[in-house]
Amino acid sequence: MLKRNRTQFDFFTLEVYSKLLPNDHLLVQVDQMIDFETLFEKMSVKYSNIGRGSKDPVMMIKIMLLEYIYGYSDVQMEKFIQTDIAIRWFLKLNLDEKGPDATTISHFRVNRITEKDTETFFNEIVKIGIDKGVVKAQRFIIDSTDVAANSNYPSEKKLLHSAFDNIMKQMNKEDPVAVAILEAERSKVIKALKLKDADYSAKELAFVLKEIIESIPSEKINYYIQRREFEKSYKLLFDLFKQQFSSNGNKIVSVVDSDARIAHKSSGNVKKGYKNHIIIDEESEIIISSLQTPFNVNDDKKLIAIIEKSERDHGLKPAEVSCDKAYGTYENRQYLEDRNIQGHIAFYNNTEKNKENIYFGIDDFRVSEDLDYAICPAGIKTYNYMTSTKGLSADEGTINFKFPKDKCKKCLLNNQCVRKKKTAKSPGIRTLSVDLRYSTVLKAKTHNNTKAFKTAYNRRYIVERRFATLVKNHGLRRSRYLGMVATSKHILMANLACNVIRLLKLSQQFKSRALYAT
């Protein structure tokens, strides 16, 4: 049953708070800035009118906010609720009232507040910035940062054993004899593998474990799989088998957190876990919107989604957008042009794309803006092309420019231009494939030579300042929880707390300017 804290303190509590709590305290400012009554109205629909009285949902949301402002855990929060005067005032607790314990806080976060609720709270904070006029929507910056998963990353073989062990533990409760037989079979096949090769591969292990699991009678599997936990463990093990037998890059790296993923951020720099994709207002540095994904989701896949999310949630369409090179796909550049948004996105050079590439790439050719002709590095122009759009939309497909056979074969640059087959006895002919959206790229290259581009692109460091604050002050380096849903809540709350502190700082700056002006 929904229970609401009293809105007024008793006389003695009020006297204590008024004497001990300064008006400029951080939590006083937060309480004045955020309309928590609106949050109560939105949260109240989640509660029944019967049963034992619940903790005030607004108080619980405040507790979540405090954890991310101060970096407290649930256990630390329980302690400070009892001992910190400012926190007790913020939560509207009288001096003789007992606050929620760590278990209650955890229960609320896991079972009461959803990812959507957390997003609603985040959007309410952004709305404050919009209403105050600090968010200008002139130029937005898009980027992402990694968030480590809350688990260790064992070897592929240990991963397979752990997943197998999970199934054995769940079966052991009802059928210990069958489990003992399966365990003995595992020991036997592992011994055989070691005799054959002490350094046997994870693929070999996956093959023998798969045979053992598949030896379990189907009626037993069907019986156990009705239980959600067993079904989850069973699916995880077979997903691990599948990734050993295929080249799929969507690799599971932890049994404890099976949603976490691995990717290479740069050469030799392996990251495991999740990503926080954000779009910020350059002038105010407020995080407008965010998206959370496993780490193996490429940044460029989220540019369109996060721009549309900021417009859908807040009615904000930027005039300009700055991003790093990773976002510079044909699709993204075309989207920005079609939406009349000026993109400030640099280009990879051939060396960055492929350090071993010795052949001329598209950047070594000159292509007309109307895609009517192309000029090769040797200065040969061709109008000879064919367009390929089979199965694609009108603005997709390629134009394939073909250079003159007689000139290609005699060209001194042929070895740098045409890839030869080992069996080839004579110089080849170069064909240049150009995306139909390449005119957008040419316009972008022209823009990238302007002062406006250089000014905007050099200011992308601002987003790194937000990331540094999120990691240092709001616990974003590593997720507190397991799984995509719980980690999304963690990231959203960190982004939210970062915005709250930023808005307070901006408000103080505005007040200082107003005092100076008078």
Image (spheres, helix red, strand yellow):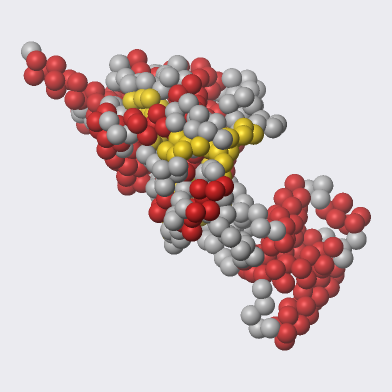
Picture mark count: 0
Q: Nearer the viewer, residue 447 or 384?
A: 384
Query: Where is residue 55 shown, x and y percent of the image?
Result: 51, 30
Quadrant of the rendered structure where residue 53 is? Answer: top right
- Say if residue 144 shows up in the picture: no
401 relative position to 33: left or right? right
| Residue at 70% across, 58% down | 246
Give above or below for 257 relative to 159: above
Quadrant of image for the C terminus: top left
| Residue at 57% across, 54% down | 428
Give above or below for 146 relative to 62: below
Query: Where is residue 39 shown, x and y percent of the image?
Result: 47, 21
| Residue at 54% across, 62% down | 153
| Residue at 54% across, 48% down | 406
51 relative position to 270: left or right? right
304 relative position to 288: left or right? right
299 relative position to 85: left or right? right
Quadrant of the rendered structure where residue 422 is? Answer: bottom right
Q: Nearer the viewer, residue 322 or 329?
A: 329
Query: Where is residue 385 shown, x and y percent of the image?
Result: 58, 35
Query: Where is residue 194 shown, x and y percent of the image?
Result: 70, 83
- Say if residue 217 shows up in the picture: yes
Q: Residue furthest bottom?
A: 195
Q: Residue furthest top?
A: 518
Give above or below for 246 relative to 459: below
Quadrant of image for the N terminus: top right
